[in-house]
Amino acid sequence: MIKNYKITVNGKSYDVTVEDGTAQPQAVPVQTIRQPESSRAVETQVSAEPQAEKISGAVEAPMPGKILKVLVAEGDTVKTGQLVVILEAMKMENEIFATADGTVQKIVCKTGASVSTGDALLVIA
């Protein structure tokens, strides 16, 4: 479904077309809208979040937060669905589970550390 809107920014009108779709998100280049010299520039940016390099076998943080407890050690054998990390986010304890069967090769996070969405917590191989 396509919708057309008229948007006014700093007194200047713009026609905008928005498509409600099922398309995959894509990076969009930064656009700068410049007003006359007497006005300040208005900058708008729409882009995908930068992708961190993915580590094969990594269990990743699903949200930003603080590591409360790491429940496994390097060399431990884990099963898919096994509780491996407790992550505090928004004052709630979130359980992070192993995503595959295997051996914990490396623990990337430390208790008390802050992590961002997508950060590797540990690696299972």
Image (cartoon, rainbow, N blue to C red):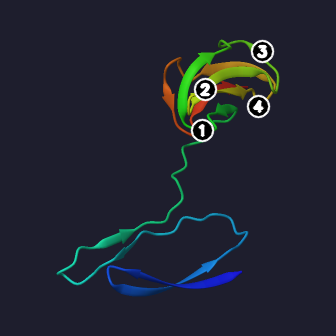
**Residue 89, image x and y in percent?**
57, 32
Q: Which residue matches tag 2?
A: 87
Indicate the quadrant containing the C terminus: top left, top right, bottom left or bottom right: top right
Disc 4 and disc 3 in contact, CB within 8 angstroms: no
**Residue 13, image x and y in percent?**
40, 87
Q: Which residue matches tag 3?
A: 77
Whether residue 76 is situated above or below residue 38 in the rendered picture: above
Decide which of 125, 73 is in the foreground and name it. 73
Task: Please rate how many residues cluster around mark 1, counting C-alpha atoms within 10 Å: few if below 14, some from 14 to 19, many from 20.
Answer: some
| Quarter of the rendering containing residue 93 | top right
Q: Amino acid at mark 3?
A: Thr
- Name which residue lies at 59% across and 38% down: 63
User: Quick one: SS at disc 1?
Assistant: loop
In front of the other: label 1 or label 4? 1
Q: Which residue matches tag 1?
A: 63
Whether residue 69 is situated above or below residue 39 in the rendered picture: above
Query: What whole-number distance in Å separates the C-alpha atoms at marks 2 and 4?
Result: 16 Å
Disc 3 and disc 1 in contact, CB within 8 angstroms: no
In front of the other: label 2 or label 4? 2
Disc 3 and disc 2 in contact, CB within 8 angstroms: no
